[in-house]
Image (cartoon, rainbow, N blue to C red):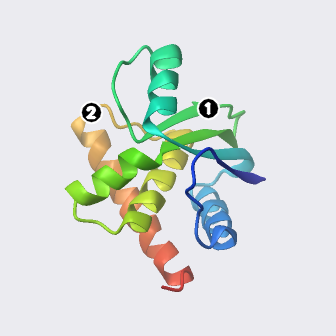
Amino acid sequence: MIDFNYQTKFRLKQSKKIKSWLEEICICEKKELGELCIVFCNDEMLLNYNKKYLKHDTLTDVITFDYCVKDKVSGDILISTERVKENSKIYNENYFDEVNRVIAHGLLHLLGFKDKKEDQKKIIRKKENYYLKKLNKLIIR
Protein backbone atom coordinates (compact mmCIF):
# COMPACT_ATOMS: atom_id res chain seq x y z
CA MET A 1 0.00 0.00 0.00
CA ILE A 2 1.19 3.49 -0.83
CA ASP A 3 0.06 6.53 1.12
CA PHE A 4 0.78 10.17 0.27
CA ASN A 5 0.92 12.61 3.16
CA TYR A 6 0.96 16.34 2.46
CA GLN A 7 2.50 18.63 5.06
CA THR A 8 2.55 21.50 2.54
CA LYS A 9 0.17 22.94 -0.07
CA PHE A 10 1.83 20.71 -2.66
CA ARG A 11 -0.38 17.99 -4.21
CA LEU A 12 0.98 15.19 -6.37
CA LYS A 13 -0.44 15.05 -9.88
CA GLN A 14 -1.77 11.73 -11.19
CA SER A 15 -1.16 9.91 -7.92
CA LYS A 16 -2.84 6.69 -9.14
CA LYS A 17 -0.35 6.45 -11.99
CA ILE A 18 2.52 7.24 -9.62
CA LYS A 19 1.38 4.39 -7.36
CA SER A 20 1.32 1.97 -10.30
CA TRP A 21 4.77 3.17 -11.34
CA LEU A 22 6.20 2.61 -7.85
CA GLU A 23 4.74 -0.88 -7.77
CA GLU A 24 6.31 -1.56 -11.18
CA ILE A 25 9.72 -0.38 -9.93
CA CYS A 26 9.52 -2.89 -7.08
CA ILE A 27 8.51 -5.69 -9.43
CA CYS A 28 11.35 -4.85 -11.85
CA GLU A 29 13.79 -4.98 -8.92
CA LYS A 30 12.33 -8.35 -7.88
CA LYS A 31 10.87 -7.07 -4.62
CA GLU A 32 7.38 -6.94 -3.15
CA LEU A 33 5.84 -3.61 -2.21
CA GLY A 34 4.73 -3.43 1.41
CA GLU A 35 3.74 -0.25 3.26
CA LEU A 36 5.13 2.93 1.73
CA CYS A 37 4.39 6.43 3.01
CA ILE A 38 5.60 9.43 1.03
CA VAL A 39 5.50 12.68 3.00
CA PHE A 40 5.77 16.02 1.21
CA CYS A 41 7.05 18.65 3.62
CA ASN A 42 9.11 21.85 3.83
CA ASP A 43 12.82 22.42 4.40
CA GLU A 44 12.38 23.10 8.11
CA MET A 45 10.63 19.80 8.81
CA LEU A 46 13.13 17.77 6.79
CA LEU A 47 16.09 19.57 8.37
CA ASN A 48 14.72 18.73 11.82
CA TYR A 49 14.45 15.05 10.85
CA ASN A 50 17.93 15.16 9.32
CA LYS A 51 19.38 16.55 12.56
CA LYS A 52 17.40 14.35 14.93
CA TYR A 53 17.66 10.97 13.22
CA LEU A 54 20.69 11.20 10.94
CA LYS A 55 22.80 13.74 12.87
CA HIS A 56 23.24 15.85 9.71
CA ASP A 57 22.83 19.62 9.97
CA THR A 58 22.20 20.16 6.26
CA LEU A 59 19.28 20.72 3.96
CA THR A 60 18.37 17.80 1.71
CA ASP A 61 15.64 16.96 -0.75
CA VAL A 62 14.85 13.44 0.49
CA ILE A 63 15.30 11.20 3.52
CA THR A 64 14.21 7.59 3.71
CA PHE A 65 13.39 5.50 6.74
CA ASP A 66 13.75 1.83 5.91
CA TYR A 67 11.31 -0.68 7.43
CA CYS A 68 11.97 -3.40 4.83
CA VAL A 69 11.79 -7.04 5.86
CA LYS A 70 13.55 -9.45 3.49
CA ASP A 71 12.12 -8.78 0.01
CA LYS A 72 9.14 -6.73 1.21
CA VAL A 73 9.82 -3.03 0.63
CA SER A 74 8.38 -0.77 3.34
CA GLY A 75 9.38 2.63 4.59
CA ASP A 76 8.84 6.34 4.76
CA ILE A 77 10.11 8.74 2.11
CA LEU A 78 10.19 12.36 3.28
CA ILE A 79 10.56 14.97 0.53
CA SER A 80 11.18 18.69 0.88
CA THR A 81 9.17 20.37 -1.86
CA GLU A 82 11.22 23.54 -1.29
CA ARG A 83 14.49 21.69 -1.98
CA VAL A 84 13.01 19.98 -5.02
CA LYS A 85 11.85 23.34 -6.39
CA GLU A 86 15.30 24.84 -5.86
CA ASN A 87 16.99 21.82 -7.46
CA SER A 88 14.65 21.94 -10.46
CA LYS A 89 15.88 25.49 -11.10
CA ILE A 90 19.54 24.59 -10.56
CA TYR A 91 19.35 21.58 -12.91
CA ASN A 92 16.93 23.28 -15.34
CA GLU A 93 14.36 20.49 -14.91
CA ASN A 94 10.60 20.57 -14.85
CA TYR A 95 9.45 20.78 -11.23
CA PHE A 96 7.16 17.74 -11.40
CA ASP A 97 9.82 15.70 -13.21
CA GLU A 98 12.18 16.54 -10.35
CA VAL A 99 9.53 15.53 -7.78
CA ASN A 100 9.20 12.18 -9.55
CA ARG A 101 12.98 11.74 -9.68
CA VAL A 102 13.22 12.28 -5.92
CA ILE A 103 10.37 9.83 -5.29
CA ALA A 104 12.20 7.23 -7.41
CA HIS A 105 15.45 8.04 -5.63
CA GLY A 106 13.87 7.45 -2.23
CA LEU A 107 12.34 4.16 -3.34
CA LEU A 108 15.67 3.05 -4.84
CA HIS A 109 17.27 3.62 -1.44
CA LEU A 110 14.64 1.34 0.11
CA LEU A 111 15.44 -1.20 -2.60
CA GLY A 112 19.04 -1.22 -1.41
CA PHE A 113 20.75 1.24 -3.73
CA LYS A 114 23.32 3.60 -2.18
CA ASP A 115 24.78 6.91 -3.35
CA LYS A 116 27.68 7.73 -1.04
CA LYS A 117 30.43 6.83 -3.54
CA GLU A 118 30.79 8.09 -7.10
CA ASP A 119 30.18 4.69 -8.71
CA GLN A 120 27.04 4.24 -6.58
CA LYS A 121 25.79 7.68 -7.65
CA LYS A 122 26.16 6.70 -11.31
CA ILE A 123 24.20 3.49 -10.79
CA ILE A 124 21.34 5.12 -8.88
CA ARG A 125 21.12 7.98 -11.43
CA LYS A 126 20.98 5.46 -14.27
CA LYS A 127 18.14 3.62 -12.47
CA GLU A 128 16.28 6.91 -11.88
CA ASN A 129 16.51 7.80 -15.56
CA TYR A 130 15.36 4.33 -16.61
CA TYR A 131 12.30 4.41 -14.36
CA LEU A 132 11.46 8.02 -15.22
CA LYS A 133 11.25 7.01 -18.89
CA LYS A 134 8.77 4.29 -17.89
CA LEU A 135 6.72 6.84 -15.94
CA ASN A 136 6.68 9.31 -18.82
CA LYS A 137 4.89 6.67 -20.91
CA LEU A 138 2.12 6.54 -18.27
CA ILE A 139 1.65 10.25 -17.58
CA ILE A 140 -0.43 12.58 -19.67
CA ARG A 141 1.12 16.04 -19.92
Mark 1, Cα crowd under 10 Å, few <14 / some 14-19 / many 20+, is some
Residue 9 is marked as none
Percent position (x, y) of residue 39?
61, 44
Q: Which amino acid is tagged 1?
A: Asp
**Residue in view at x 29 percent, y 52 percent:** 87
Q: Is residue 13 above or below residue 60?
A: below
Mark 2, Cα crowd under 10 Å, few <14 / some 14-19 / many 20+, is few
Q: Which amino acid is tagged 2?
A: Lys
Percent position (x, y) of residue 31?
66, 50
- In primary-sequence order, the first of circles 2 and 1 is 1
Q: Is residue 68 above or below residue 3?
A: above
**Residue in view at x 37 percent, y 45 percent:** 83
Residue 66, picture quadrant: top right
Residue to which mark 2 is pinned: 117
Residue 85, picture quadrant: bottom left
Q: Are marks 2 and 1 in contact (CB under 8 Å)?
A: no
Percent position (x, y) of residue 67?
68, 31
Q: Is residue 124 above or below residue 92?
A: above
In the structure shown, which secondary structural element does the residue marked by tag 2 occupy? Answer: loop
Residue to which mark 1 is pinned: 66
Percent position (x, y) of residue 104?
49, 55
| Along the line of sight, the residue nearer the viewer: 47 or 126 | 47
Residue lying furthest bottom in this view?
140
Q: Decide if residue 49 is on the left or right side of residue 30.
A: left
In the structure shown, which secondary structural element does the residue marked by tag 1 occupy? Answer: strand
Q: Is residue 13 above or below residue 10?
A: below
**Residue in view at x 54 percent, y 35 percent:** 64
**Residue in view at x 40 percent, y 42 percent:** 61
- In this view, the mark in front (2 or 1): 1
Marks 2 and 1, Cα distance to the nearest angstrom? 20 Å
